[in-house]
Each structure stands twice: as C-alpha cells, then as structure tokens.
Image (tube, helix red, strand yellow):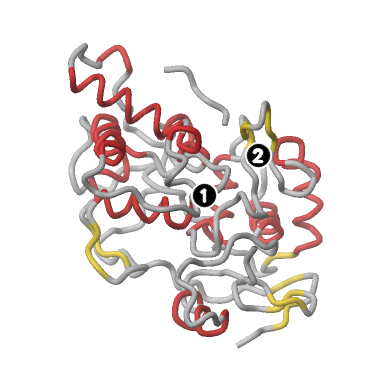
Amino acid sequence: MKPMILAALTLAFGSVHAAPIAMEDQSQLKTPPAAAPGFTPPAESELPDNAYGKMVRDGYALFVDTRRLMPDNVGNGLNCSNCHLDQGRLGNSAPLWGAYPMYPAYRKKNDKVNTFAERIQGCFQFSMNGKPPAADSPQMTALSVYAYWLASKAPIGVESAGRGYPEVAQSAQGYDFKRGEQVYQAQCSICHGANGEGQKVAGNYVMPPLWGKDSYNWGAGMHRINTAASFIKHNMPLGKPGSLSDQQAWDVAAYINRHERPQDPRLVDGSIEKTRLKFHANDGVNLYGQKVDGVLVGQGM
C-alpha cells in the first residue's frame, strides 16, 4: 500500500503557567511505554486473495480516503489517516494495531465501556465533525476488519510501546501563544497554511486544516493542548518527528487550539459555560469556555 500524505478564565496573550492535567479516564489502561515501538504490523503481501483480504483493502481505502468515500459521515476536511499516520501503522501516532487489542474499555468521555466500533463512532462525531456510521454498517465492518488485521499479531490487552501519543510533560513555563505562532509560521504553515486552512488540490484536501470550519470540533481529543502537544512532538513536522522541543510542541499546540473550530456537538442547553463545566473543566488542558485576549473561546462556527 502506498503511503498517503495526506466560568470564564481570562488568559493573556503570553505565558500561561502549568496546571494539573486531568487526563481522560480509561482506568484500566495504563500509560503506554515511551520506548520505541517494537511491534511491526503485517505487510500487504501477507494478505490473502480472498473475501477477507478484500475486506481489509476496503477498510484501508476508507481509512485513508474517508472524506471522499464517506461523505455522509464526515463533516469536515479530515481523513482517519490525518491523526493516525502511515495508514494507521505508525507507532506513537495512535496506531490501529495499538488500539484494537485494548478494547472494550471504559471511557470517561461517555461514561461507559466502549467497544472498538463505539470508539470509531466517537472519532466520526468529534474528530471528523460528522455522523457516526452504524455499528453494523458495511463501512464500520471494513474499518474494524482493517484494524483487526493490523493488530492480528499483537498481544491482546497488553500495553504495546507506541500505542498512543506518548505524553509530553508541560514545562514550568506553561505555554505561550506568541512563541507558538512563531513556531507555527516557521514549521507548520508551509503545509497547513498561514491561517490553518490546509491545502487543497482539485478541491480535495491534501494537507489537513488545523482550525476553522473544516477541522476537528471542540469535542475532539485533539482540542486538548496536552494531546496536541504529544502528537506534534512525536510526529510533526511531517518527516521530522522529534525535531521540536517539548516547549515548542506545547506552545504551537496552544496556538493552534486557541483558534475557533466547529462547536462541541454535546453543547448543553446552548450554553458554552454549561458545556465547559460538564465536559471540559476536567479534560486535560484546554481553552474551551475560557477567554483569550478578552474573546470567549469555544463559540464554534
């Protein structure tokens, strides 16, 4: 398979000091080891030429070309492979082979034990700002089979190195929007655009938008500054993972996530404040429902 690139707290436009991080609770899942991934998913050449192999290939196609192939389910400009790099194969980029063996699992986000299909549905609702496919739909079956195939040689229920986005600790300096903007313009804008708009060719995104109407919404995990910092540190800039310092990763993550994006679909009674208190106040480090330079963040678009 060919890789495809695809209560308001007023914050000053400057440093924000470190605060305790209340991470999303998946209580039975320990933090994955930070060591280099030791698992190698199967190669395409190992796929059988039968109905199962065809289903895996169908799932792969949906994974890397989600927006075009699932227009009724994707409400922005993203594909699954934008957050799970190298077709969901790359360690430290939330690879499918690391996720599939760990479900079912409890998630605080919806306060229930989730199946893997329900986890994928959450990605469509939040990261893709769309309508989740039914658990028994052909698309969900294909995506699940593709994930199963990638994880078919991985141990079940075992913490594999490289499973998620290894945590990048917040420094005592906190994060700084001005520094983040400088990092963004120097390291990110060449692919994602000066205004986070991404890049299109013939009307299709070839580089994903990082904010605005076609990016992930305020309910997505990537809206958390700590999550975005971990993804950026280990995966960006594309082709140069680990080239940014921890501080730069936090700064640029904060800069990206101070910008508006689609509303959290869980909006409570039309109130940003009620939504912040219910869903965001204890969800990592995020800016939803806070004020930055006197402007309320989280108004959606």
| Type of amino acid under label 2 | Ser
The percent position of residue 26, horizontal first and vertical second, equals 31, 64
Query: 40 or 57: nearer the eye?
Result: 57
Taking the view exactly as shown, the residue that stands out farthest to the bottom is 7
Above or below residue 78? Residue 178 is below
The residue shown at (51%, 84%) is: 274
Secondary structure beneath disc 1?
Answer: loop
Q: Position of residue 291 (x, y in %)?
A: 70, 78
In the depicted structure, whether residue 197 falls above or below residue 288: above
Left or right: where 67 falls relative to 60: right
Quadrant containing the C terminus is bottom right
Task: Determine which quarter of the picture holds residue 5.
Answer: top right
Residue denoted by label 2: 243
Q: Position of residue 208 (x, y in %)?
A: 62, 40
- Asked which secondary structure carries label 2, the reply is loop
Numbered disc in front, either 2 or 1: 1
Q: For this view, does 14 lie left or right of residue 2?
A: right
Q: Amino acid at mark 1?
A: Gly
Q: Which residue is mark 1?
A: 75
The crowd level at tag 2 (other Cα within 10 Å; few <14, some 14-19, many 20+) is some
Q: Position of residue 72 (x, y in %)?
A: 43, 44
